[in-house]
Image: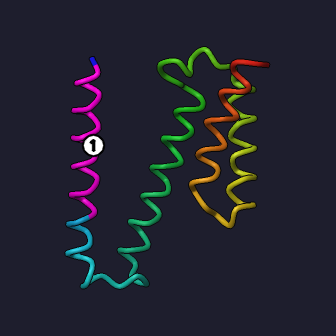
């Protein structure tokens, strides 16, 4: 089973870095102020928001056992950490994992 996890990590990493590499190669001709660029930016944020909402409202796996209130508390606190850390993604990500573990195991 651990070999499957390693394969999954390798495949997803390859897909991520390949798309980023191809994006870096083709980005010279795209202006950041263009309507197409703004549309893709909005599309990316909308997709991310939909995935986060789906994970919170219709969870899969072990997250099914966590109550809705715990999930919403973690999201609210993580958003506060996100804005307090000048919109850094690392701190709220780590904080949310720790906060979810604490809420799920001790409260």
Predominant secondary structure, magenta span: helix
Residue 41 in the figure: left or right of residue 66? left
Which residue is disc 1 drawn over?
Answer: 12
- Residue at 48% x, 22% y is 60
Quadrant of image for the C terminus? top right
Q: Nearer the viewer, residue 70 or 58?
A: 70
Residue 67 falls inside the magenta stretch: no
Vertically, is 2 above or below 43?
above
Quadrant of image for the N terminus? top left
Residue 85: name its quadrant.
Answer: bottom right
Vertically, is 101 above or below 46?
above
Vertically, is 62 above or below 32?
above
Q: Nearer the viewer, residue 71 or 99?
A: 99
Residue 58 pos. (x, y %): 54, 25
- Give the extent of the magenta segment: 2-20
- Residue at 59% x, 29% y is 57
Residue 2 pos. (x, y %): 28, 22
Vertically, is 38 above or below 19?
below
Residue 55 pos. (x, y %): 53, 32
Residue 12 falls inside the magenta stretch: yes
């Amino acid at each position: 089973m651990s070999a499957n996890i390693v394969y999954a990590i390798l495949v997803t990493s390859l897909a991520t870095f390949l798309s980023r590499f191809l994006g870096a190669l083709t980005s010279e001709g795209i202006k950041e102020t263009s309507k197409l660029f703004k549309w893709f930016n909005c599309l990316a944020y909308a997709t991310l928001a939909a995935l986060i909402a789906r994970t919170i409202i219709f969870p899969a796996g072990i997250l099914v056992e966590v109550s809705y209130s715990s999930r919403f508390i973690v999201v609210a606190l993580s958003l506060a950490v996100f804005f307090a850390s000048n919109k850094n993604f690392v701190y709220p990500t780590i904080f949310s994992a720790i906060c979810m573990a604490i809420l799920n195991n001790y409260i």
